[in-house]
């Protein structure tokens, strides 16, 4: 039922996440996605930092895992995504959960 695997060396994309009451767009500089696992590095231009999202799936559609800032930020947390195949790539739609805060929406487009 999963979507076919992408070549992890060729995949990039963009991230659109909602936090602080506004939407933020950043570049996905490296993406590896399979039916069982995803790893995405996102350059966060506002913070001059990189977020690494790591999640796993048992069905190739629903992924759970976490996200971590490289520079030791305390804004790490959990992520939940559903994976969809679009006409020009894959889309992950979900949310991030940071301890002590309300969950926020997160959309990642993989091309």
Image (spheres, rainbow, N blue to C red):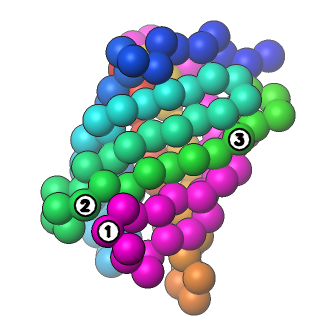
Q: Are marks 2 and 1 in contact (CB under 8 Å)?
A: yes
* Residue nearest the viewer, comparing 36 with 109: 36
The residue singled out by tag 2 in the image is: 49
Instruction: Give the magenta-colored segment's residue range.
Output: 61-88
Give the quarter of the figure containing the C terminus.
top left
Main secondary structure of the magenta stretch: strand
Mark 1 neighbour class, 10 Å CA radius: few under 14, some 14 to 19, many 20 or more = few
* Residue nearest the viewer, comparing 11 with 87: 11
The residue singled out by tag 3 in the image is: 56
Give the quarter of the figure containing the N terminus.
top right
SS under mark 1? loop
In three-dimensional space, the C-alpha distance between marks 2 and 3, rounded to whole angstroms, equals 23 Å
Q: Please provide percent x and percent y for residue 76.
A: 49, 71
The relative height of residue 78 versus residue 28 in the rendered view (above or below) is below
In which image quadrant can residue 36 be found? top right
The relative height of residue 12 versus residue 53 in the rendered view (above or below) is above
Q: Is residue 78 left or right of residue 19?
A: right
The relative height of residue 87 versus residue 78 in the rendered view (above or below) is above
SS under mark 3? strand
Q: Are marks 3 and 1 in contact (CB under 8 Å)?
A: no
Nearer to us of marks 2 and 1 is 1
Taking the magenta stretch, the answer to whether it contains residue 24 is no
Q: Which residue is outermost to the bottom?
A: 100
């Amino acid at each position: 039922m999963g979507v076919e695997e992408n070549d992890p060396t060729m995949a990039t994309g963009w991230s659109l996440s909602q936090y602080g009451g506004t939407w933020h767009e950043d570049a996905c500089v490296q993406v590896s996605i399979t039916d069982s696992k995803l790893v995405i590095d996102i350059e966060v231009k506002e913070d001059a930092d990189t977020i690494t999202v790591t999640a796993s799936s048992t069905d190739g559609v629903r992924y759970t895992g976490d996200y971590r800032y490289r520079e030791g930020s305390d804004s790490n947390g959990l992520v939940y995504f559903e994976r969809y195949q679009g006409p020009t790539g894959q889309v992950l739609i979900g949310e991030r959960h940071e301890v002590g805060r309300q969950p926020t929406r997160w959309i990642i487009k993989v091309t």
